[in-house]
Each structure stands twice: as structure tokens, then as C-alpha cells.
Amino acid sequence: MQNWFPENVSTFGGDVDAMFYLIYYITAVWFVLTEGLILYFLFRYRHRPGQRAAYVQGDNLKQLAWIFVPVAIVIVLDFWIDIRGAEVWAKIKGEVPPSDIVVRATGKQFNWEFVYPGPDGKFGTPDDLQLDNDLHVPVGKVVRVVLSAKDVIHSFFLPHFRLKQDVVPGREIIAWFEATKPGNYEIPCAELCGFGHSGMNGMLYVHTPEEYEKWLTERWPLSGQAPEISKKPES
Amino acid sequence: MNASSATLTDTAIHAGKTGTWWFLASEIPVFGGLIASYIVVRLGSTGWAEAASHLNFNLGLINTFLLLTSSMTIVMAHAATEENDYRKVANFLGLTVLLGLGFLGMKAIEYTTEISNGFLPSSGIFWSFYYGMTGLHALHVLAGIIVNLVLWIQALKGSLARNGHRVELAGLYWHLVDIIWIFLFPLLYLA
Amino acid sequence: MKQEMMQTDHERLGFWKTYIFSTDHKTIAKQYLSLALFWALMGGATTYLIRWQIAHPDTEAPGWGFIAPDFYNMLVTMHGTIMVFFVAMPILLAAFGNFLIPLMIGAKDMAFPRLNMLSFWIFTLASVVLIISFFVPGGAASAGWTGYPPLSAKAEYTGVEWGMNLWILSLALEFASFLMGGVNFLTTTMNMRAPGMTYFRLPIMVWMEVTAAVIFMLSVGPLIAGAVMLLMDRMIGTTFYLPAGGGEPLLWQHLFWFFGHPEVYVLLLPGLGIVLEVISVFSRKPVFAYRPIIYATIIAGFMSFIVWAHHQFISGIDPRLAMPFSITTIIISVPFAFVIFSMIATLWRASITFTTPLLFAVGSLGVFIFGGLTGIFNGSAPVDIYIHDTYFVVAHFHYTLFSAVFFGGFAGIYFWFPKMFGRMMNEALGKIHFWFTFVFFNAVFIPMHLVGLRGMMRPQSLAGQYAGMDHGLASAPWQFRRGSERLPRPL
């Protein structure tokens, strides 16, 4: 079961996985009960000499109780799932936590464009940097992503972070994540966007604090100036 | 409706009427969807009142009057079927057809004026909705006119008498077309 | 007098009026069934090519050749469109509904036999239009069976021009055909029941068909409106869905899913009806809790109109909408749980003979339980963040749809075949058919859940391009053993 998901490296990913497992355990029990009962009944009540069917219509309360009680249990479990789910949803999609690191991510046919505000922290200034498909962030910091699309709907999907958000042209949608472990993680597009959808993929580079500083200084050697873009692509 | 499809149970409503009501029930969500979309998109945008000011309020008002009157004439046609006076039926159906054609004529004038003034379907989101909603509505008016025309011809030829209930059914459809306009007019021309 | 009437009823009509332009509900049902089975084969062809491309990317599919990426998108689009609108709807609603409703309520035919015939021929026209869409320059629609704009709203985004327009027109004709059918089903059931046949004496199959018809009639309107708007965007330059012109892409999604969600229950209910009828017969017991099942079904029908945005949790809608729709979605599982428990209770203290229809019916029940349970994962908004648009969703809806359309449909075909055609189907072949279907269906679709949880998105034809996707696992479901389960044919 540990192998079902890609490795989780996100602060809220564990909550999503926990919801999944909560639902999994509940549904697994129901599955075994119902399918088991069906198989048992098929065996126990199979037609053979002497096996007469009982004329049972299920039109009185005593018989219907056998249905209503399990249904009531289902309702209670449903509400438990919803209440727990509401908390997790609010954490991920509700208020975006405050953050120093903001990146604009724009989907287009067929790649991601990431725009960094640069050391001045403001977009639309000369020290902004645009990188295609490469998103660089430090570990352990909240990253705020301003999502949009240039042409059709795409979807920003970070499997290792349990984060997904459709990007819609004409809108700006804010998403956030915080990495717990350095590494390189794919950013596939998760909404059919045309013939190049299969293979539309970005890469998230989560750096240790030192590596991130190094990357910043390589890109912006002099604060306030336009970034260095003529560097070798990162490994 | 002939003997074999008559109600076998004690439902008081005959098949044609039940069928027509279900048909209308399916049409309502079509325009309901359009109107709801209009309202939601409009509430979320700006500049619609300005665009809408280029509509011809007077022609819209005349059209409202034409359709309302035509709903009345078709009711009178239905009443005439109950009196078995098929001359009267023909007259009122004919009036209904004329009023419907008048509505379409007004719409044609409006469209040509708007287009020659440069307000095309591609001129913006208000115009998308204007042409979409009134266009779809106009197609429904046309369909109704054709139905009424067929019934009118049958009334003139004398063959409508054995199917006189069809005037009521056509009337039900025509009233729906009218009611939809009653919603479109304020949303587009007044707001 | 009676003699004359009988002679009139049985006058010979000639070949064309008997078999082609028939107004007889049983013939029309068979016509729908035949055309739907043709489309099932076409849909199966799309399946073959889709699977080949996933399992052996960028190789030539035997009997076809290379599958280019835009053609692949066309395949998945057409697969969904064909299976939902040209296989599932005609089999479950048009074929079974037309055949069974008049017989089960004691009526001579449908209320409007000529309208019935017209509905079939309009459905045929819709089929022709869809076929033509493959052959126009640019090919057939390729924006997914859900056709989200802006991808679907401007030809330049897909390279498909007339193909998509014809797709929209074909669906519009199909909707018109089924609206006519709905008028017929509902009027017939309301007005033409035999004396003494009150509503709560109707066979459960009729209740399911009628409820499905009501849901369809009331839910399809907004999509028709949306489709008109999409066609206008494509053809006359309106900007309903194009942000550059002030439009809103998400508007389509709401209009589509407002219909799309009730539509899945339109497909499910007749399947449930067949399963209930067949289980009841081969258990030699009445349907357990007949009346509560009807109430549960009606409640589910109402609720189906207030869950639609669970298809849109992460689509950009206000996040505060997610929890209300999550709640309604999870609650809608309750009436269906009731129906499932009642089906199981019908087996209790029964005397069960394992005929082919019963095997398919129980198979349908078993598969539906699995599919319904995976629905809970999808309905929980936070979990959906991860599994939305992955193969987990694809696995979920194939379980629920297969349950209704293929297991339920075959249960019905095997069960009512003698009534329809006057001869029995071959039991041995039928059982082989069932076991192949059951085993290989699960073999294909269970791994699909796992592939989805690993993160494989839909529609995805090049899993090898993503380091995180275990390509071996991704291609495992798409082996070709499943094709063989189709081969044992009746007779």
C-alpha cells in the first residue's frame, strides 16, 4: 500500500493521503461485507431439491430495518468523511498562508512558463525572469503560485505534493505548497489541452537553502539588475 | 389521437396534452440555462448596460406587444374550437401567424440595423448573448409559426375539425414562446 | 365489428413498413439495439487503438498504423462520445424502454408511434453526421467527450474545424431523438396503463425507465443551450467561452455537468431495473422493498441535480463551493446504498438458478458496488485534488458504467432475447461470455486504479515521458486478452 502513491514531499500531502486511507478503510469494510454477503447468499440459497424461495416482500418495518440500519450507518460514515474532508480542503484550498516566495505559472500549448519576480519581489520590473518548464524553490518555505493560462485550460499538477489546480485563461488562481524534501519533481499538465498534452511536463527543483542561494546568485548576480539567462540548464 | 391511443386509465388528460407538457418541460431548461448563464456572466462583468443601450427599446416593446396579442389570438382560436366554429378558428389562427411574422419582421429590422451599425455577434460578450438568446428564441417562434400555419391551412380546408384539440396544444407551445420573450425583454432591453 | 378491427390490426404492411419505417415499438426497439451494437463495435475499435498506443507507444497498431497525438485525442473523444451517447443511451433507454414499457403496462404500443419512428431515424441521422465527422478535413472532434472550451471553441487550438461542429450537431440531433423518446415514454406510462395498473403496481423496470426519462428531459436543456453557444463561438464569432471577448470558459463546464451528472443516473437506472427484474425472476422471489426502492430512486433523481460541481472541484470555481457539493455528492450514495442492500436482500432466502442473465445481473451488482465505493473517493474534495483527471477516475466510471451498460445490458439482452426474437440463446456460450467479460473486465480496470494513484493523467498516451510513471504498470491493463471476451457470441 505504501507504493500506491508517489512519495509525498508536501506539508499537506500527508493530510490528503490520510483522507484517502480513511475512505479506503471504510469502503474496504463495506466492500468485503456486501460482496461477501452476496457470495454467501449465492451459495447458501442456490437452487437445489428442497430449496424453496421465501415469499418475502420487504414491505414491513421489521424487514426493512435490515436495510435502514445499514443505510443509517452509511450516512454517519459519510458525514465523518465530509467533516474530516472539509478541514483538509480548507487547509489546502482555503486561505493561502503568507509567503515570501511568489512565482507566476502560466500554462500554454504545450509548456509551462514560470516568471520569477526577482530580488525586488515585484512583477513587471526589469529583474523579472521567465523560465520555461523550470520551477526553482527552496525546501521548507511556503511557495505561492499565481496560476493562469494563455490559450486553453491546462492543469498544474504536482503529484508528489498532492496538489492540482486547473489553470483557466482569463483568470488568476492562487495555489500554494511547501516542500519537505529537496529533489526534482515533475509538473505534468493534467487537463487535455491539445495534441501536445501527452508529454507536456515541467520540472520543480526543490533546493536546499544553500543550493537555492546559489541559484539566486547565479541568476541575479547584481541585485536590481536584469537576470542572467545565458546559463546552462540545471541538472 | 384515435381510439387506440385513448387513455385506458382514468387520467383525465389526453395523450397529446401530456406529451406537449413534457415537451415544454424539456424546453424550459434550455432557455433557463441560457438565461441563468446570462445573469451569472453579466453579474460578473462590466459594461453591459452600455452595450445594451444600443438596442432599440421601441422595437423590443412593439415585439412584446405583438407576441402578447398573438397569445391572445391563439386562445381565441382555441375557444372557437370548443364552439366548433372553424371559420373563427381559421381567422384567429391566421391572425396569430401574421402577428408571429410581424415579430420576426421586427427582429429582422433590429438585426440588420444593429449589424450595419457594427454590432456583430463577435462584438463582445453582451452581443454574444443578445444574438444567441434572441436568435434561438426567434427560431422557436419560426417553428411555432409553421405549426400554426399548418393548422390554419387545415382549418381553412375543413380537415382540422376532427383534430381540434391540436389548437390547444399549439397554443401551449406558443404561450411558452411568449413567456420566454417576457423574460428576455427585460433582461436584454430594460436592465 | 370486432372481426373487422382484428383484420385491420393484422393487415400486412409490406417490407418497408414492417422492417424499415415501422411504427411498432418492438421493431423500433430492435432497430435501436442493432444500431447501438454497431456503435459498440466502433467504440471497441477506438478502445483497441487507444490501448495499443498506451501499451506500445509510437509503434504501428496492427491493422491500422501509427497513431499520431492529435488522432489519439480524437480516439479518446470519440470513445467517450460513442459509448455514452451511441451505445449506452440507445441500448438501455431506447431499446429496452421501447420494447418493454408498452408490454409491461398492458398498452398496445407507445402513445405516439409515428413520433417513435421519427426518433429512431433522427438518431440514425445523428449517427451518420458523427461518422461523416471522421472524414472531413481536420478529422473528428478531439477535445474530449466533455469538449471543454477554449480548446473546443476555436478551431486553431485543436486543428479540427468541421469535425467538431459536426460533433456538436450530431449530439444535438441525438438529444432531439431522445427528447422525443422521453415524451413518448412518459405520456405512454401516464396515460396508457391497463385498467387496474396503478403506479405502484408497475414493474420496477418501468419505474426505472420512467424516472430516467424524467431526469433526462429536465437536465439536457442547459447543455443544449451550452452547445448552441459553443457552436456560435465556433461558427459566427461569439465569445461565450472566450476570455478575450469577455467570455467565461467555466460557464461551459457548469452547463455540461448540470446535465452530465444526471445523465449518468439516466444510464444507471435502467441497468438497476434490469438487475432487479432478473434477480427477482431467478431467485423466485419478489423484488425486496419494491416501494422504498422507488422512493429512493426518485430521491436520487432529485439529488442528481445538485451534485454536478463535483466534476469541477479544482476547475477554478470558488473553493467555498466545494464542500456543499462534496456533501450532496456523498449523500447521494445513500439512496443507491438502499437499492443495493435491497438487491442483496432479494437474494436472501431465495432459490437461485444460475442462468446467464442471472450471472450478468449479479456481476452487474458486484461491479456496481466496487464502482460506487470508488465514487466516495472522488466525491471527497481533498482526495479529488489528487485523483481528478487521473486514471483513478477513469477506472471508477468504467466500473459504474460497465455495471449498467454491459453487465446490465447483457443481462437484459439474454433475458429478453426469447421474448424479442422467439428463440433461446445458447446457455453454454452465454456463460462463457459472462466469465470472460467478468474476469477480463476486472483484470483491465483494477490495475487502472493503481495507475491513477501513481499519478497517470488522462488522456495520456505517452506514459514513458514521465519519470514518475511506472511505464510497466501503466501499460499492464492494456493488454489484449480482453478482446477475446467479446468473441463468444450467442446462437
Image (spheres, coloured by chain):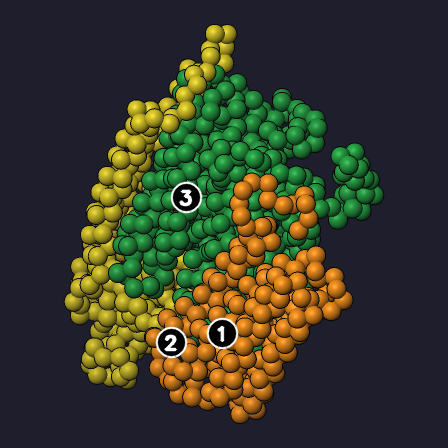
Chain colours: A yellow, B orange, C green
Residue B42, numbered label: 2
Of the 4 image quadrants, the one containing the N terminus of chain A is top left
Percent across and percent down for residue A207 are 23, 61
The circle on residue B181 is 1
Say which residue appears at 68% left-offset and 53% top-offset: C118
Mark 2 vs mark 1, foreground winner is 1
Tell me the number on the disc at residue C298.
3
The amino acid pointed to by label 3 is Ile
Q: What residue is rendered at 51% in x and 71% in y?
A: B178
Mark 2, Cα crowd under 10 Å, few <14 / some 14-19 / many 20+, is some
Check chain identity for marks 2 and 1: say if they share one: yes
**Same chain, marks 2 and 3?**
no
Quadrant for the C terminus of chain A in the image: bottom left
Q: Residue at x 53, y 68 (%)?
A: B175
Q: In the rendered view, tell whether residue C16 sits above or below residue A37.
A: below
Q: Nearer the viewer, residue B117 or C140?
A: B117
Between disc 2 and disc 1, whose residue precedes?
A: 2
Are the residues at dot 2 and dot 1 in contact (C-beta closer than 8 Å)?
no
Q: Is residue C192 visible?
A: yes
Residue type (three-letter) at the residue carrying disc 2: Arg
In whole angstroms, how far apart are the C-alphas of marks 1 and 3?
33 Å
Question: Does residue A29 appear in the picture of this structure?
Answer: no
- Badge 1: how crowded within 10 Å, few (<14), some, or many (20+)? many
Does residue B83 appear left or right of residue A162 in this picture?
right
Chain identity of mark 3: C
Residue drawn at x 62%, y 31% as measured from the top left: C416
Q: Position of residue B131 (x, y in %)?
A: 52, 78
The chain letter for the residue carrying disc 2 is B
Q: Chain of mark 1?
A: B
